[in-house]
């Protein structure tokens, strides 16, 4: 009832926070024009000449080679026109005060300005109930009924989490602003409606539902028209979960949510570094966008604000078109441990998996797993908002997720960008649930003290009848 | 260039002004509370008693009766806590400077701030004469490149003028709907289904592709992280089409587009000169929302900026859960002419159709049609973001669209809310294409002078083997 927004994530000062580092590879920034083209350039002014040899043209043409082709087939006068037009286009890219909308106006007169996120005061409840998770099932063994994550009881307030000594609170954040296909708002309910979470894990023979106190913490409200307006609230809600002693398991929603979620988990212990293992086809570290947040920028925001350090970020499964050399070089400079599918093709998955585990264990004690479903191959996860062919298979991803969650200290987990309408079958939702269950199994193993490397239960590994004599 | 800049400033002013010039919201009614409740209210301050009588409290219960029930079973202390809580909620919901931001900040330092909408200079491409670009390889037309109506491509206003273009079909892939999203793929789906927009129309034996100069005007750039930012550019491009004398046909995209589409019509033809027919399951006049535009409030935005009056609007097919009775009354006061599916159920479609046609023709004004595909029944249009059962059939919608476009001076048309991902079949895009075709046919009929009410070709109508020929050809 006295809750107020503690995070004010979108201060107008955002744009002052820019990270340094390579903006382009050295070869491409400036390049003198080849002498053979010199006769085409005689009509250019010194300023135009400087522009042509600078980085500007590469914002309009994909490569210097293609630019040279364009110059070659033009007369000197046409070249001058082309360069003048290029300069005008690049100049128009930038914000023009008085002409461009520098901020998106809202309607402060609206009596419903904040209605999407105002929490219901307890005094308005019709019936009293003692704090703690409550079951919405009728039977002792009920598989159907009211759909909840993991078939778990429901908790709605931090008091419920504390009273129930909750280990894991699974919450949906139905944000729907993916830069790919949009249906992630239905991700949480698709996963609630599907089995597979809190099922016994065959490999470890551990049932996370039996070991952990798991709840469905409901959904966190979002503003469907604006990321910026909702992320403050997501931040507050995640903060509540962590402060109540539970590990937040967040179900997106698009991947922009990684920014408030990771920030909230870090902010609970501001002095302590946080390690992040980010699975996804996309690096999400795009810089310089005209918006201050999107799925493509979440990682950049976290780095730019110093929420996490580059050396504490491990990325697995990168392969999407967002990757370019300039960004990879910048990511190296930031110290990011990236693992592309090219590396998997070259070294083999087992080697990459071991490397990721070694890096995670060498990093900060507290680890957050940010899982974008696009890391999985579209054949096993068609419903990814930003799907890319050639991804990891479940049999590759699941062991790594289980081991990360067993062998490091997980303080948060999120699964993002499941867009159910893209898959007419049950597969995407089921496989997403299995990924989450792998992490829950790992956490349960750890709680039981099973932290030996790559633990599997001996009974499932071998039928124990010996090998037939040769 | 100068014109564009100043209109941008005007738009920016509009955006800011929209917050202030709210159109007469219903007054807050004070309601008397039953005497039986009086003992429960003794701890309330006068301010709290007044609050309890306001409309606002109805948001806390399905009805005032239920709220009174909730209060009656509480002690005076509990009632006070209850009212405190309601008033706290009211304060939380309102904007508060310092706590909330009144505008969403953008990164004005971005070197690519406007990159999404910067147009390609002519000097980048080999010289070509202005005019529609023919993509066909064969005499029979076509080369496999999918375009709206299989039409040639035009990219600039000069192309439209040089080609004497009468209809420019343009995509606007805006994807910010409140239901399922995917409307950004509407233009693509309708290009892939493009040839069904053109060709001969059986009913009239008119072939719009032969009668009219039609082009595919490409897509309008959209910022899909902000509807508001996209609006100004859409208005600009729709206006530039209309200014050449061509009829813009905008393929959305979500229904927020109705705001810039109609605004562009007003820019060109002036206020009070255009009647708008809004086909939709939804009324789209949402008010008092924190965002100044979304696909549920384009008409309110037009109204609050003074671009239209309620009387400029005819709405057909309304049947979603909103508006409520109070809002319908307000719409009546504002002069909206609405035709709900309840009216269709009571009086029959033919009656409603004739009424709509009569209203559209009444003052001989220009006509703009905003066609949300969810006005059709979901069996024909599964692929739409906010479907509502019980809609029109194509055999109802196609004739009214054809007739509206033939019997009136059409100046623009938009077809919005196609979300192809929701329909793995071709059915949604096929029906959407046929709605566009119905209007193109109507526009072509008008050019040919076939504007008599409900013209159908007599030869198509009857095999004439039994003497009824005379009757039909008369």
Image (cartoon, coloured by chain):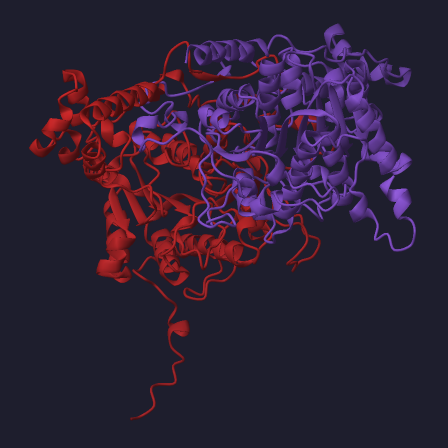
Rendered purple, the chain in question is: B
Q: Position of residue B474 (x, y in %)?
A: 87, 39
Q: Position of residue B18 (x, y in %)?
A: 59, 12
Q: Is residue B232 visible?
A: yes
Name the residue nearer the viewer: A448 or B317: B317
- A63, above or below A16, in the image: below
Q: Colour of chain A?
A: red
> Outermost residue, left direction?
A35
Name the residue nearer the viewer: B224 or B280: B280
Q: Position of residue A82 (x, y in %)?
A: 26, 25
Instruction: Tell me the quadrant of the picture where the N terminus of chain A can be found.
Output: top right
Judged left or right of residue A452, residue B89 is: right
Residue at the image position 78 percent from the left and 22 percent from the top: B361
Judged left or right of residue A420, residue B404 is: right
Instruction: Tell me the quadrant of the picture where the C terminus of chain A can be found.
Output: bottom left
- A425, above or below B249, in the image: below
Judged left or right of residue B357, residue A20 is: left
Judged left or right of residue B292, residue A36 is: left
> Outermost residue, bottom direction?
A470
Label count reads: 0
Q: Position of residue A146 (x, y in %)?
A: 67, 49
């Amino acid at each position: 009832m006295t809750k107020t927004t503690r995070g004010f994530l979108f201060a107008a000062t955002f744009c002052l926070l820019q990270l340094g580092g390579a903006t382009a590879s050295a070869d491409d920034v400036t390049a003198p024009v080849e002498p053979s083209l010199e006769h085409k350039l005689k009509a250019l002014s010194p300023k135009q000449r400087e522009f042509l040899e600078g980085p500007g043209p590469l914002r309009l043409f994909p490569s210097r080679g293609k630019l040279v082709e364009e110059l070659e087939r033009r007369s000197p006068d046409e070249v001058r026109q082309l360069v003048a037009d290029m300069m005008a286009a690049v100049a128009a890219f930038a914000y023009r005060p008085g002409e461009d909308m520098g901020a998106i106006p809202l309607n402060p007169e609206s009596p419903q300005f904040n209605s999407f996120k105002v929490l219901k005061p307890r005094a308005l409840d019709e019936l009293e109930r003692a704090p703690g998770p409550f079951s919405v099932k009728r039977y002792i063994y009920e598989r159907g009924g009211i759909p909840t994550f993991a078939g778990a009881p429901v908790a709605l307030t931090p008091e419920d989490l504390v009273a129930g000594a909750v280990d894991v609170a699974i919450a949906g954040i139905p944000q729907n602003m993916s830069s790919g296909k949009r249906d992630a708002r239905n991700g949480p309910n698709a996963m609630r409606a599907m089995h597979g979470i809190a099922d016994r894990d065959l490999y470890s023979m551990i049932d996370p539902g039996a070991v952990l106190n798991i709840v469905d913490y409901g959904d966190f409200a979002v503003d469907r028209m604006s990321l910026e307006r909702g992320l403050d609230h997501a931040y507050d809600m995640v903060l509540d979960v962590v402060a109540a002693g539970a590990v937040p398991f967040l179900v997106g929603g698009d991947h922009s949510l990684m920014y408030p979620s990771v920030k909230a988990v870090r902010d609970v212990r501001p002095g302590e570094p946080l390690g992040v293992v980010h699975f996804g086809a996309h690096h999400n570290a795009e810089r310089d966008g005209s918006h201050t947040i999107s799925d493509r920028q979440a990682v950049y925001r976290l780095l730019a604000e110093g929420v996490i350090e580059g050396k504490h970020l491990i990325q697995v499964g990168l392969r999407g078109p967002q990757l370019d050399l300039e960004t990879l070089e910048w990511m190296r400079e930031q110290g990011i441990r990236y693992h592309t599918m090219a590396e998997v093709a070259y070294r083999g998955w087992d080697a990459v998996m071991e490397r990721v585990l070694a890096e995670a264990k060498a990093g900060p004690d507290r680890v957050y797993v940010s899982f974008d479903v696009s890391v999985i191959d579209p054949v096993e996860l068609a419903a990814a908002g930003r799907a890319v062919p050639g991804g990891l298979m479940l049999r590759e991803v699941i062991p790594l997720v289980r081991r990360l969650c067993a062998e490091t200290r997980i303080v948060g987990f999120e699964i993002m960008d499941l867009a159910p309408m893209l898959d007419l079958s049950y597969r995407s939702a089921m496989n997403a649930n299995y990924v989450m269950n792998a992490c829950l199994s790992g956490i349960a193993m750890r709680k039981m003290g099973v932290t030996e490397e790559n633990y599997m239960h001996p009974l499932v590994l071998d039928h124990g009848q010996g090998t037939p004599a040769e | 260039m100068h014109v564009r800049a100043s209109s941008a400033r005007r738009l920016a002013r509009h955006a800011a002004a929209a917050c202030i010039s709210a159109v007469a919201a219903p007054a807050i009614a004070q309601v008397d509370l039953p005497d039986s409740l009086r003992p429960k209210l003794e701890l309330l301050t006068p301010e709290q008693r007044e609050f309890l009588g306001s409309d606002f409290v109805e948001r806390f219960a399905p009805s005032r009766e239920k709220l009174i029930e909730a209060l009656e079973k509480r002690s005076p202390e509990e009632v006070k806590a209850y009212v405190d809580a309601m008033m706290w909620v009211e304060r939380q919901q309102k904007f508060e400077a310092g706590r909330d931001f009144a505008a969403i900040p953008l990164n004005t330092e971005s070197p690519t701030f406007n990159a999404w909408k910067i147009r390609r200079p002519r000097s980048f491409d080999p010289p070509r004469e202005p005019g529609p670009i023919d993509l066909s390889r064969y005499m029979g037309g076509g080369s496999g490149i999918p375009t709206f109506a299989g039409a040639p491509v035009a990219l600039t206003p000069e192309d439209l003028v040089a080609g004497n273009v009468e209809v420019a079909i343009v995509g606007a892939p805006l994807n910010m709907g409140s239901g399922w999203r995917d409307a950004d793929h509407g233009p693509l789906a309708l290009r892939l289904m493009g040839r069904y927009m053109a060709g001969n129309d059986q009913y009239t034996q008119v072939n719009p592709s032969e009668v009219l100069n039609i082009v595919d005007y490409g897509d309008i750039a959209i910022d899909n992280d902000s509807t508001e930012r996209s609006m100004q550019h859409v208005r600009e491009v729709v206006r530039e089409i209309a200014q050449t004398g061509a009829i813009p046909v905008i393929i959305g995209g979500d229904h927020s587009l109705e705001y810039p589409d109609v605004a562009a019509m007003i820019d060109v033809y002036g206020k009070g000169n255009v009647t708008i027919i809004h086909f939709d399951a939804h009324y789209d006049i949402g008010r008092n929302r924190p965002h100044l535009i979304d696909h549920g409030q384009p008409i309110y935005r037009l109204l609050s900026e003074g671009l239209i009056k309620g009387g400029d609007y005819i709405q057909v097919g309304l049947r979603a859960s909103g508006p409520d009775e109070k809002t319908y009354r307000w719409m009546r006061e504002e002069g909206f002419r609405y035709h709900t599916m309840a009216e269709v159920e009571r009086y029959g479609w033919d009656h409603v159709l004739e009424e709509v046609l009569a209203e559209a023709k009444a003052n001989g004004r220009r006509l703009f049609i905003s066609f949300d595909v969810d006005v059709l029944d979901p069996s024909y249009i599964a692929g739409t973001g906010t479907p509502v059962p019980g809609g029109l059939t194509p055999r109802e919608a196609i004739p009214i669209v054809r007739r509206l476009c033939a019997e009136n001076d059409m100046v623009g048309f938009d077809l919005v809310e196609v979300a192809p991902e929701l329909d793995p079949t071709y059915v949604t895009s096929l029906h959407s294409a046929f709605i566009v075709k119905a209007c193109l046919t109507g526009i072509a009929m008008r050019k040919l002078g076939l504007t008599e009410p409900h013209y159908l070709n007599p030869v198509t109508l009857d095999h004439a083997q039994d003497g009824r020929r005379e009757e039909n050809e008369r």
